[in-house]
Amino acid sequence: MRFRFEPTVEQRTALRARLERLQQPALALEILRSSLPAGFDPTRVVCTLQRAHADRFVMRVGLRSDAGEERAYALKAYADDFGRQVWAHSQALAPHHPGNHHELSLPMRYLPHEGLLVFPWTDGVFLREIVDERTPELLRQAAGLAAFLHRLPLVPEQPTTAEVIAAEARAQCEALRDQWPETGPLVEPVMAAIAEAVATLDPAEPALVHGDLAAGQFLWTGERLVLLDLDMFGYADPAYDAGHFLAQLERRCLSDPALPAHAAQWSGCFRDAYLAAMPQVSPRNVSFYQGVTLARKIHTIRRNRISEWPRLVPRLAERALAALEAVVSSEQLR
């Protein structure tokens, strides 16, 4: 499981150069030629940057022919050779691609000379942006799609243990405390709770996991949900994905006062549907990974939301501590 990757200066520079090249329509068309259907001859090309980070970017390329026929593709690049691993994982997933009821977004081609993954573009609305009466049912569908992924008989790598995930979370808390000492009284109890809780977890069989499961990874097309960004894949307790999703949902509810009153029920919609579909997954372990993810997101909030962190970080730390303490207390009650 790829937790963090810090590209070198040279890799960042090379990635920016590739991004600049791909923003040239003629070059983007040349790269896509081999992926276009027979008989489709585009005369208009529009390149639109979708996301850019230090280690990767995604570009949308829209194509239109004189006859009015349109196609769109996503080009994804990484600062290192990680695209090759993502392509290999996608090839292993492809035979299990489920069709219309459960949809995985998989690349259609890998271009090694460009270091690019080519995806068919999918139009839709991110689940995180849907905050109306559709949300509960869509969260249940997202839980079902997560369960589908976790049941696939694939072993993409060596297992990532709970101890490794706990150590990663504690390291982020330590880095947060060292950089911003004022956060020490908030994160130190969380660090201690992680160490105590990880020793009490229920045994778990590892499974294929998404690795970054959140509402922002699901796209609603109007007919079905599509699960995106399968490049953080791992082999771990499937409770990791469920806990990560719930933590991201909880973080959203804590930080966005504009959400409707029924948002408080969203976590239960996902959790209940997921555990019903995956009864072998430990609810205690789900709570553990929810607490661990909340702890990791404290660092993100402190770094990125400068004006809001005094309000948000204490609440995140409180919720992380509550989830982790619930793991220990439920063990003591057995």
Image (cartoon, helix red, strand yellow):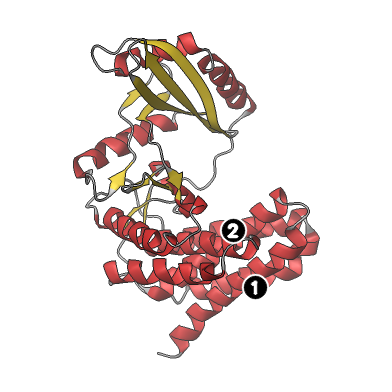
In x, y percent, where is residue 254? 62, 65
Q: Residue 311's x, y, as percent?
A: 74, 64
Residue at the extreme left of the image, as rendered: 95
Name which quarter of the figure residue 68 lies in.
Answer: top left
Position of residue 292 relative to residue 105, above or below, is below
Residue tagged 2: 296
Numbered mark located on residue 135 in the image: none
Asked if residue 175 can be seen in this view, the reply is: no
Report the front residue among 107 and 48.
48
Of badges 1 and 2, nearer the viewer stands 1
Q: Which residue is mark 1?
A: 318
Q: Residues within 10 Å of mark 1 (few under 14, many from 20)?
A: some
Q: Residue at (75%, 70%) from the top-left corner?
A: 185
Residue 28 sits in which quadrant?
top left
Residue type, label 2: Arg
Label 2 packing within 10 angstroms: few (<14), some (14-19), many (20+):
many
Residue 149, how many percent across, how many down? Answer: 29, 53
The answer to whether residue 322 is above or below residue 240 is below
